[in-house]
Image: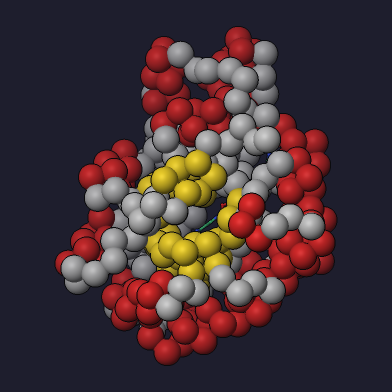
Amino acid sequence: MSNVPNIKLNNGVEMPQLGFGVFQVPDAETTAAVSAALHAGYRSIDTAALYGNEAGVGKALAASGLDRDELFITTKVWNSEQGYDKTLRAFDASMKKLGLEQLDLYLIHWPTPARDLYVETWKAFEKLYADGRVRAVGVSNFQPAHLERILDTGGTVPAVNQVELHPYLQQIEVRAFDAKHEIATEAWSPLGQSAALSDATITRLAKRHNVTPAQVVLRWHLQLGNIVIPKSVTPARIRENFDVFSFDLSAEDLSAIADLETGRRIGPDPATFNMR
Ligand SMILES: NC(=O)c1ccc[n+]([C@@H]2O[C@H](COP(=O)([O-])OP(=O)(O)OC[C@H]3O[C@@H](n4cnc5c(N)ncnc54)[C@H](OP(=O)(O)O)[C@@H]3O)[C@@H](O)[C@H]2O)c1
């Protein structure tokens, strides 16, 4: 039995609050990493067409012996494939690589606002959802202005917004907007790609709770209500990152972490990132 709570998405679908990310893991190494994660108890896996490792994820899923309904799989449409027909084709290509009949969550990877295709792409997502090919649809790296345009169509409200979110970039405004519209916020680079792990406040709290810095940061996310998807290719870290349910951060601890905000991003700014 896993300790991981589920987050109920706005269409009633349940998504594990803690999952496993595979950004920057080469396809050939992905099967081993995902197998280690499934062995440790993770059931939610986050990949993307861009990562080039959907096939590696699919192999690990097939080899796991787990029932399909125990797993929650997310992938994302890459910027170059936005647009109605291209998105439908990109979805089929991803599903073939993953070896799945139905996906749990499909995300628009970036809004790429200068290309102005995300509303059209969202229409394709609504078709995939209506056809039962995917259980929930969402977005990634969407700022309130981009979400407003989707909401203005009056169609399906995104179930999830996956954004860069860690102690140095806490996304107060995006989280408040998401919450107001019943969009679950999912944190990418939840450990700040490990930058947050040597922070003096984080290491002090780790000592106090007799846990590791990564466990403090992940616990902070969980207590905030974020969905988190830490990445690691190191089996001991994969297990460590899953062992975050036996302690609680106090209100004082949470406020010490709140003070770490710098507003600085690791990744690109969604307002100006238009790469194909
Ligand atoms: N939607 C988007 O645009 C977007 C962008 C970026 C990421 N993501 C998603 O978010 C996931 C996580 O983000 P991320 O991979 O960028 O960064 P992250 O999870 O914040 O950090 C990963 C880094 O931290 C290290 N690490 C992990 N656990 C550790 C531990 N317990 N102790 C010490 N170091 C530890 C890993 O090293 P080792 O692997 O060497 O162990 C790796 O270098 C991605 O894999 C991807 O699924 C989405």
Residue at screen point 77% across, 65% down = 62
User: Colour mode?
Assistant: secondary structure
Residue at screen point 67% across, 13% down = 210
Left or right: 261 as drawn, with respect to 176: right
Query: Residue 29, can we see it?
Result: no
Query: Residue 62, can we see it?
Result: yes
Residue 262 higher or lower than 200, as above or below: below
Residue at screen point 48% across, 69% down = 134
Residue 12 higher or lower than 149, as above or below: above
* Outermost residue, bottom side: 85
Left or right: 59 as drawn, with respect to 198: right
Left or right: 14 as drawn, with respect to 72: left
Give the quadrant of residue 162.
Answer: bottom left
Residue 276's x, y, as percent?
A: 48, 78
Q: How many marks?
A: 0
Residue at screen point 72% across, 67% down = 58
Residue 255's x, y, as percent?
A: 39, 19
Residue 38's x, y, as percent?
A: 74, 48
Give the quadrant of residue 122.
Answer: bottom left
Residue 74's x, y, as percent?
A: 55, 61
Give the quadrant of residue 269.
Answer: bottom left
